[in-house]
Structure formats: C-alpha cells, structure tokens
C-alpha cells in the first residue's frame, strides 16, 4: 500500500511538473513574423543579401551637396567657368559674374583635395522649375546606410553611406550649376582654380547624363534639398534585405532619443491577432531572425517637416518597445500563435461542426429508441 502511494505521488508530481513546463512553454514569447509600419526622422539600415542592393531608386531634389568623396566624374557636352576673380553669390545662385566658355573633353573629373572631408561640391539644376534626382544608390552587403530628415521647416535629407567604396549617381537635369567649395583638382580646366571656390556650368552629354560620385574608402555623404511635397513619395519599390535596423537619433546633448515621429504599427500576417501600436517618442527595438525585408521606403511630411516612411516584414527575434527599458515585448507566445493561427481556427470550427452533427444524430437516435405509450 505504501509503495503504491509513493508511486502515485511521484506520478502526480511529474504530471504537475510537465503541466507547469507546458504552460511556461505555451506562454513564452517566440520569434514571430511581423510587419512594421512607421514614420521616423532617422533610420540606420544594415543591408544583407549576397549582392549590392539599390536602397534608393530615385529621389527628386532641388540641390545635392556631396561630401567625403574622392572623385566626381561626368561627360560634359558644354562647360562654362565663372570668373575666379569675382566672388559668386550664394550656393543657390552664382550672382552676376562673367562666364568663360571652355571646350569640354569627353569627360570632366573633380578630385577632392588633400583634405577630402573638407571639400564640398553642390550640384543644382540651372533651369528654373526643374529638379535633379539621386539615382540608384547601391549599398554592399554588410554595409550601412543612414537616412536622417531635418527637423526644420526647410526639407533636407542627409544620407551617409558607411562601407567599402560607396558609389552614387546623380541626374543633374539638362543644365546644372556646380559649386566647388575648398580646393579640388578639376580636369579640363585651365588655368587651375585660383581661389578656394569654383563655379562651373555644365551641360551633361545626352548619351551619359548621370554624374558618378565615388566616396572615400569607407564613407560618402549626400545632403539633399527636397522639393515641397504633401503626400508620401516612394524612393524605392524593390524589397531590400536588412540584417539590422536602428531607429534612434542623437539629442542636443548627445543622448539617444527615439526617432519615431508618429505611432508605429506592428501587424502579424501569419495569425489573426490584433495589431500593436507603439506611441510616438517611444523606443522601438527590432532584431531579425535572419533578415527583414524592407517593403516600403519613402519620404513624407509630419507637421510640415520632412520624414521617412518605412514598412518592413520578417521573422523578429526581438520586437520590444518602451520609454527606456523596452518593457513591452511584441512577439507572440506559442499558445497565441497556435490558437490564433488560421489552420487551428479552421480545425476548431470543423471539430465544433462535427461535434454538433454527432450530438444531433445522437438526439435523433434517442428519440427513435424511446418506448411508445400504449
């Protein structure tokens, strides 16, 4: 008798332990497929895949300022140079000056000086009302692209590429002003620039209208002055593999701040689960279990300021938010995934229907077998 009690007690304890483990396992968050939509002021993307990805297809711009480059090259049909003895006006307009026509070679090359980080070149369309555009900005696998929109009324977008030998291409329009700030070597120009700054007017050759920009060994910075726009404007329509994403910005005192400008939304495409909303200003930490796919990437406005709109999807190993402690975990538990999955819901519905049919048949059978009154 005692032995039977001990065995029964041991079995009961083991059963309770298994039940506790099953409950814990069912309630534990697990990597979950999510789709996140957000509007931010800054984002850093680490590109994945096995080949270069075009993180930008086209961004219309009123001007493009280039920094941290080693070489800018284009084919020029015509070339004019401002009188270097006269001081040009602002970057937007060279003011009244004398333009010297120059016979352009088949190519024009601007090479940064001895301090490339201090050399800046600004490209601006000459024809009023026309826009230039940043075209096909490629990022190598493992490299980073940082996009940061200005928090001022003037719509600016700063792009920083961090990686090996970054390259960008710019369409300057049919005619363009090129402002070279600080000494640089310019081919097809004689005599060489006599001052620290240089103004050029260029008509790109029709057969090769794009300006190629080669960054330094590990970086390239492009600052764009955006045209006014009210709605969302896509800058990339192809999915981009992303291995890491950072949605923070730097405060005035160097502290990390959230870059969320509007509430973000986390949806669960694999299950019938309610969406989660992350308030604006809260931190959002996302880490993929493999890679995310950046499905939507565009520019918009929030309170009159430029902003970046993102939509990404993938299996999230980490999906947390909060003010500073990331207290909210937005992954689903095993039980939530099982109970809310469409397959399980269909099976439950079929089981319920089958149970109803069995109960109905049993009721009919019991009615038939009841004894009749004499």
Image (cartoon, rainbow, N blue to C red):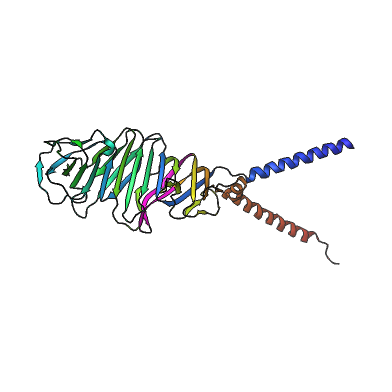
Residue at the spot x=59%, y=51% of the render?
340
Residue at the extreme front: 253
Residue at the extreme right: 1
Please state if 218 lies on the left or on the right of 15 as rendered.
left
Asked whether residue 324 appears in the rendered view, the answer is: yes
Q: Position of residue 19 (x, y in %)?
A: 71, 43
Residue at the spot x=69%, y=54% of the render?
355
| Magenta segment includes 296 | yes
Q: Which residues are magenta?
A: 290-311
Q: Quadrant of the C terminus?
A: bottom right
Please state if 151 lies on the left or on the right of 120 as rendered.
right
Q: Position of residue 43 (x, y in %)?
A: 41, 46
| Magenta segment includes 106 | no
Tell me which corner region of the image, top left, top right, bottom left or bottom right, holds residue 221. Answer: top left
Tell me which corner region of the image, top left, top right, bottom left or bottom right, holds residue 145. Answer: top left
Q: Quadrant of the N terminus?
A: top right
Tell me which corner region of the image, top left, top right, bottom left or bottom right, holds residue 353. Answer: bottom right
């Amino acid at each position: 008798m005692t032995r039977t009690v001990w065995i029964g007690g041991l079995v009961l304890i083991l059963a309770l332990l298994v039940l506790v483990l099953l409950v814990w396992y069912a309630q534990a968050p697990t990597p979950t497929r999510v789709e996140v939509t957000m509007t931010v002021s800054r984002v850093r993307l680490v590109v994945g895949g096995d080949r270069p990805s075009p993180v930008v297809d086209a961004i219309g711009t009123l001007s493009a300022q280039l920094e941290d480059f080693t070489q800018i090259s284009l084919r020029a049909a015509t070339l004019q140079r401002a009188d270097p003895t006269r001081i040009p006006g602002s970057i937007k307009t060279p003011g009244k000056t004398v333009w010297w026509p120059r016979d352009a070679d088949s190519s024009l090359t601007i090479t940064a000086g001895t301090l490339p980080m201090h050399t800046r070149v600004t490209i601006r369309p000459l024809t009023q009302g026309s826009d230039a555009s940043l075209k096909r900005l490629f990022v190598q696998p493992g490299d980073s692209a940082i996009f940061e929109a200005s928090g001022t009324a003037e719509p600016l977008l700063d792009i920083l590429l961090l990686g090996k030998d970054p390259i960008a291409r710019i369409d300057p329009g049919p005619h363009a002003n090129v402002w070279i700030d600080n000494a640089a070597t310019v081919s097809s120009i004689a005599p060489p620039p006599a001052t620290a700054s240089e103004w050029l007017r260029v008509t790109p050759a029709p057969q090769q209208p794009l300006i190629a920009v080669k960054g330094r060994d590990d970086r390239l910075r492009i600052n764009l002055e955006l045209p006014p726009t009210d709605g969302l404007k896509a800058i990339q329509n192809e999915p981009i593999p992303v291995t890491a994403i950072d949605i923070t910005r730097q405060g005035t005192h160097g502290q990390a701040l959230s870059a969320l400008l509007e509430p973000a939304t986390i949806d669960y495409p694999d299950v019938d689960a309610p969406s989660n909303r992350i308030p604006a200003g809260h931190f959002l930490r996302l880490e993929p279990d493999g890679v995310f796919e950046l499905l939507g990437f565009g520019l918009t406005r929030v309170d009159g300021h430029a902003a970046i709109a993102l939509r990404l999807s993938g299996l999230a190993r980490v999906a947390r938010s909060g003010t500073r402690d990331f207290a909210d975990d937005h992954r689903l538990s095993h039980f939530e995934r099982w109970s809310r999955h469409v397959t399980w819901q269909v099976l439950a519905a079929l089981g319920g229907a089958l149970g109803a049919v069995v109960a109905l048949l049993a009721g009919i059978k019991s009615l038939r077998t009841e004894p009749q009154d004499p």
